[in-house]
Image (cartoon, grey):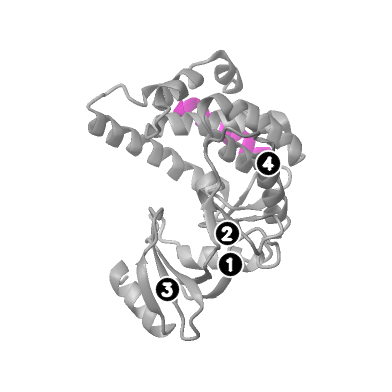
Amino acid sequence: MPAVSDRVRLAARDWQLTLGPLLAGGTRSAVYEAWDEAGRDVVLKVPATRADHRDAATDEAAALAAWATSGAAVAMLDATPDALLLVRVRPGALMPWRTDASLDDTIGAAAELLHRLWSARPESYAYPTLAQVYPEDDRVAREDAKHEQLVHGNPERGMPGVTRLPAAAVVAEELIRTTADPALLHGDFITKNLLSDHTSPVGWVAIDPLPMTGDPAAEVASFAAYQPAELILPIAEALAVRTSTDPRRVLRWTAVWTVHQAAQAWRDDQQELERLVESPAITTLLRR
């Protein structure tokens, strides 16, 4: 496959784009500010090659097409197997990770977005399943732990999470096996992928999906586990209620993803997160 720089150049040529600078925040993709021939403000996204060799752009394009009328996802203008041409989200402010205001607005917006995203049916496109994706999540958590241990010069950093990954995998397998009604999931529904959008009926849209089919409770939990450590379990419970999702399944998935967050060891609240994964609450949720 051509290098990312060549893929960007070819996509810009084929869509006759004027490229601006790289946009901040992309870690798995090259994402550029751009303008088309008509002067429209657009975004060119070239996803990185996936470890499982799936066409990431094709997966994302299929999901964005399924969500086109939902008002919950960034609008797609065109796509190829290598790249996506997207509408620029405006004003494009990030949903706050930590806020001094009431969390009710954040939880309400997240719940409305999830309802709209889950309402789309997978139809005939063969999305990856959560069962297929989970082992890669486990591998990444272990690799991230090693990286952060080297960066911080601390071989114990992330170990409370790493030592609980096997228990988390057992719980995840049980929850996946007992999923009654799989939905089309965003796959990376966290605050850094939610932007303010004046065209959305919700006021926010989701960007950068890693679409898959699976348990909606897992998606509620991933949003909660990304929050500040002291808010993870309260947000999980509140969002489960707002999305009419089984609270027990949400809390067990939240324990799974909190273990992954602790193992990845990149967060500023790492000490608080490690205390949480060692707490009786998480320990109980990880029991079969």
Picture coordinates of residue 283 (x, y %)? 55, 18
14 relative position to 150: left or right: right
Q: Earlier in the sequence, mark 3 or mark 1?
A: 3
Badge 1 is on which residue?
62
Picture coordinates of residue 6 (x, y %)? 29, 74
Q: Are marks 3 and 1 in contact (CB under 8 Å)?
A: no
Residue extending furthest toward the front: 101
Single out the mark in the foreground, 3 or 1: 3
Magenta stretch bounds: 164-179
Tell me the number on the disc at residue 105.
4
Badge 2 is on which residue?
127
Picture coordinates of residue 90 (x, y %)? 55, 63
Picture coordinates of residue 159 (x, y %)? 36, 23
Q: Earlier in the sequence, mark 3 or mark 4?
A: 3
The CA distance from mark 3 to mark 4 is 32 Å
Q: Are marks 1 and 2 in contact (CB under 8 Å)?
A: yes
30 relative position to 134: left or right: left
Q: Say what amino acid the circle numbered 1 marks.
A: Ala
**Is 99 placed above or below 116 here?**
above
Single out the mark in the foreground, 1 or 2: 1
**Label 2 SS:** loop
